[in-house]
């Protein structure tokens, strides 16, 4: 039977804490240079005992590496409400470290330990699934024990069970969130909006256009904008057209800002006025804008992208820690816990029953299409087809070359 959180006082506590501090923490990072190294240093410094970690028996402690703005942070307490609840219920402390700015850069940080089967410094990590596929193929992550995951068995959304070609049945990966990438524009600077790829090329936007360093998000949107299905049977010809569009935009100076998670600072400073973005980030920025909502975000008619960032337990994590990680993952697969997370991060949750739980937690978000896409939106959200190792190496190298990385 799936565990349930008692509605009183726990749900009330989560509601109050999430609503009171839901969008304050972006102030922590305004104006900061948060590349992969800088971000890691900042979050390690802020990982105080109240922040889901700290103290206690080291055998009852986990280290979780994740992306920024991806858990229900409470500015007033300096901690994460759901992690505090998890620790209170289980006695398991979690050092939660926002250390992933980009899949490739974070992989580079831990690849030597992965190759040697040594502890990476993290007991559980939430890479995007295309990177997880690499780790599975390299046999660098551990298989989950579903005897410890009854909530996942009951509540994982059906569409995600076999969504990763390299992990049918989710033996090695369990989805954390389903981030969508779409088009964004500053409503004052771009009153006509961004509907097509050509709209990014407006002369007034020269040097003010941004794209993501995540190849599958950026190239998927470009492929879709050129009339190709990113999940379909495209090949070198279609890829060539898409990479040429990107190269032309960068070489002309039209596209200037190429970022991972730190792209939000360019938006806040006005250095970027139109971009390919992840939906949840822009929702949070609008909510804290002192002048009211400043940015519009939209799934284009040609299509946006949908992916999964999933839990994995890397080799080198000892068996006892893996079991603690499974207990934490199972906790987050309670729909009421996931609703509290989704209310903050505003990405698509992978847990059945989350929308119903959201109606109790925050009715205003229960019909938010960025959290719970409509049937029409789902038809315009594409996955990126699996690449062969040869394709992955070739296309990744070409993409990095065009970006100048």
Image: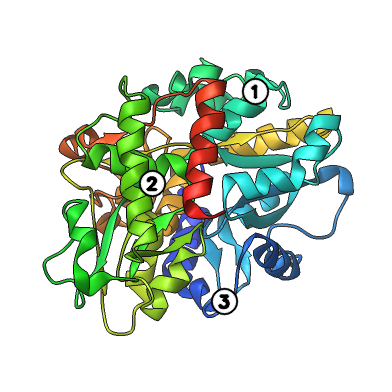
Q: Judge the density around disc 3: few (<14), some (14-19), many (≥20) Cα neighbours within 10 Å.
A: few
Residue 356 appears in the rendering = no
Among the two numbered marks 3 and 1 on one chain, the one whose residue lies closer to the N terminus: 3
Does 323 sit left or right of 150 as displayed? right
Residue 286 appears in the rendering = yes
Residue under label 2 = 218
Does 226 sit left or right of 261 as displayed? left
Q: Quadrant of the C terminus?
A: bottom right
> What percent of the width, then of the height, locates residue 228?
24, 31
Among the two numbered marks 2 and 1 on one chain, the one whose residue lies closer to the N terminus: 1
Circles 2, 3 touching at the beta carbon (< 8 Å): no
Query: Dot 1: what SS?
Result: helix
Q: Residue at x 45, y 18 (%)?
A: 162
Q: Residue at x 61, y 50 (%)?
A: 66
Q: Residue at x 68, y 63 (%)?
A: 51
Query: Dot 2: what SS?
Result: helix
- The numbered mark at residue 196 is none
Residue in the foreground of this view, choosing between 246 and 31 = 246
Q: Nearer the viewer, mark 2 or mark 3?
A: 2
Q: Is residue 296 above or below residue 195?
A: below
Task: Give the distance between the C-alpha atoms of the residues marked 2 and 1, in whole angstroms.
Answer: 24 Å
- The numbered mark at residue 28 is 3
Quadrant of residue 178 in the image? top left
Residue in the foreground of this view, choosing between 38 and 241 = 241
Residue under label 1 = 136
């Amino acid at each position: 039977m799936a565990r349930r959180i008692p509605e009183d006082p726990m749900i009330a506590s989560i509601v109050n804490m999430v609503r009171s501090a839901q969008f304050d923490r972006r102030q922590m990072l305004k104006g900061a240079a948060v590349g992969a190294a800088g971000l890691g240093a900042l979050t390690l410094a802020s990982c105080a005992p109240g922040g889901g970690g700290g103290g206690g028996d080291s055998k009852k402690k986990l280290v979780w590496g994740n992306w920024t703005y991806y858990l229900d942070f409470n500015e007033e307490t300096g901690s994460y409400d759901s992690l505090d609840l998890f620790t209170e219920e289980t006695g398991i402390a979690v050092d939660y470290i926002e250390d992933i700015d980009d899949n490739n850069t974070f992989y580079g940080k831990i690849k030597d330990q992965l190759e040697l089967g040594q502890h990476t410094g993290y007991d559980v990590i939430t890479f995007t699934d295309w990177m997880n596929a690499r780790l599975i193929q390299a046999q660098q992550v551990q298989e989950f024990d579903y005897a410890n995951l009854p909530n996942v068995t009951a509540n994982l959304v059906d569409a995600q069970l076999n969504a990763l070609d390299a992990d049918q049945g989710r033996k090695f990966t369990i989805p954390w969130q389903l981030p969508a990438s779409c088009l964004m524009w500053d409503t004052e600077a771009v009153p006509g909006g961004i509907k097509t790829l050509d709209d990014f090329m407006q002369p007034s936007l020269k040097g003010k256009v941004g794209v993501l360093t995540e190849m599958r998000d950026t190239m998927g949107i470009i492929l879709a904008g050129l009339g190709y299905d990113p999940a379909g049977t495209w090949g070198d010809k279609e890829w060539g057209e898409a990479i040429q569009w990107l190269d032309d935009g960068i070489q002309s100076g039209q596209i200037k800002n190429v970022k991972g998670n730190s792209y939000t600072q360019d938006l806040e400073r006005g250095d970027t006025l139109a971009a390919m973005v992840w939906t949840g980030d822009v929702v949070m920025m609008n909510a804290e804008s002192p002048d009211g909502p400043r940015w519009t975000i939209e799934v284009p008619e040609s299509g946006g992208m949908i992916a999964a960032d999933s839990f994995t337990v890397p080799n080198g994590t000892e068996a006892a820690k893996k079991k603690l990680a499974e207990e934490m993952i199972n906790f987050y697969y309670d729909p009421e816990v996931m609703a509290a997370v989704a209310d903050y991060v505003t990405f698509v949750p992978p847990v059945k029953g989350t929308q119903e739980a959201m109606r109790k937690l925050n009715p205003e978000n229960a019909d938010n299409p960025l959290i719970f896409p409509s049937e029409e939106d789902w038809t315009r959200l594409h996955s990126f087809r699996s690449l062969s190792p040869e394709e992955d190496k070739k296309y990744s190298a070409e993409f990095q070359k065009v970006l100048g990385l």
